[in-house]
Amino acid sequence: MTSLDAILDARGLTKRFAALVVLNEVDFAIAPGEAIGIVGPNGAGKTTLLNVLSGAYPPNAGSVAFAGHDVTKLDAAERNRRGIARSHQVPRPFGGMTVFENLHVAAAIGGQFSGPAANDICVEALALCGMIKLANRRADTLGLLDRKRLEMARALATDPKLILLDEIGGGLTDAEAQELVLIIRSINARGVAVVWIEHIVHILLQVVTRLVCMDAGRILADGEPRAVMRNPEVISAYLGSGAESAA
Ligand SMILES: Nc1ncnc2c1ncn2[C@@H]1O[C@H](COP(=O)(O)OP(=O)(O)OP(=O)(O)O)[C@@H](O)[C@H]1O
Ligand SMILES: [Mg+2]
C-alpha cells in the first residue's frame, strides 16, 4: 500500500522503554474503511503499537502519517480531533458521570461538537452501541460488557475515521463478545477503519479481513487472516496457545 491510499501510514516505528526494545522498526498501513486484527503473545508490543499510533507515547524513531499529514509530533488529543479514536484494554470511563455525560465530553473535546450537533452524535453513538436505555446511568455502576460498550461509544462520539480497539472482548463470555462483534461490524460498515487487538481469534475473524501477528516488537505476518494463522512462524510464536485451532 502506498501512503497515497492509506488513511494511516506508520513507518519504521521503534519504541524503547529503557533498554527494552518494544517496537522494532514496525511498518503498518491501514486503508480507509479497512478492518484489521492484531494478534500476538503477551508482551509482543500490541498495546504499545496502539499507544504510538494514537499518540499516547511518542516513538523513539519512525513516523506516523494520518489522512495525508505527518502526525508524529502531535499528542493524543490532537490526533483524536483529527479522527483517531481508541478504546483502552482496561476501560477508563469518568466513573462519577453518566453514560451520556461521558459521551458528551468525548464529542466536545475529541469531536469538537457543540449544541444540537453534540447531542445528535452522542445519541447516534449510544444507539449504535445499544446503550440508549443506559444514557442516564452513572458509568461506575456499569458491568464489564457495558463498560466495554461505553469505551466504543465514547470513541464513536468523536466521529472518528479510525478506531483502535485494545482487547475490547477481554474478560467477556463468548456470547457477550458476540454482541461486540455486531457493534464493531456496524461501525466498520459506516466506513470507519478498525484496528482490533484481540486474543479471542475466532471472534476477531468475524470482523477483520486482514490479520497482523506481532511478536517481540516485530510484525511476523500480515495478510489474509487464515493464511496468517497457518504461518509456521505465527504458530511457533504461540506455541499452540490457540493459533492452530483457529486456523
Ligand atoms: N510504559 C511502559 N514502561 C515500561 N515497559 C513497558 C511499558 N509499556 C509496555 N512495556 C513493556 O513492553 C512490552 C510490550 O508490552 P505491550 O503492553 O505493548 O504488550 P501487548 O502485546 O499488548 O501484551 P498483552 O497481550 O499482554 O496486552 C512488555 O514487555 C511490557 O512490559
Ligand atoms: Mg496489550
Image (tube, rainbow, N blue to C red):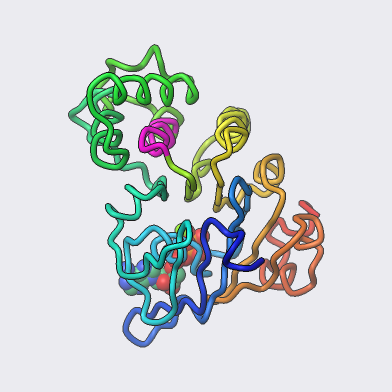
Drawn side of residue 58 relative to residue 175, left or right: left
The relative height of residue 174 versus residue 235 in the rendered view (above or below) is: above
The rendered magenta stretch, by its main secondary structure, is classed as helix
The structure residue drawn at horizontal position 46% and vertical position 30%, both measured from the top left corner, is: 145
Residue 71 showing in the rendered view: yes
The structure residue drawn at horizontal position 52% and vertical position 81%, both measured from the top left corner, is: 25
| Magenta residues, start to end | 149-159
The relative height of residue 81 versus residue 176 in the rendered view (above or below) is: below
Drawn side of residue 75 relative to residue 52, left or right: left
Q: Hey, which quadrant is residue 227 in on the image?
A: bottom right
The relative height of residue 117 versus residue 215 in the rendered view (above or below) is: above
Viewport quadrant of the N terminus: bottom right
Question: Where in the figure is residue 127, as x and y percent of width and height?
Answer: 46, 19
Question: Where in the figure is residue 173, as x and y percent of width and height?
Answer: 57, 33
Question: Where in the figure is residue 66, as x and y percent of width and height?
Answer: 45, 59
Q: Residue furthest bottom?
A: 19
Q: Hey, which quadrant is residue 132 in on the image?
A: top left
The structure residue drawn at horizontal position 37% and vertical position 25%, both measured from the top left corner, is: 121
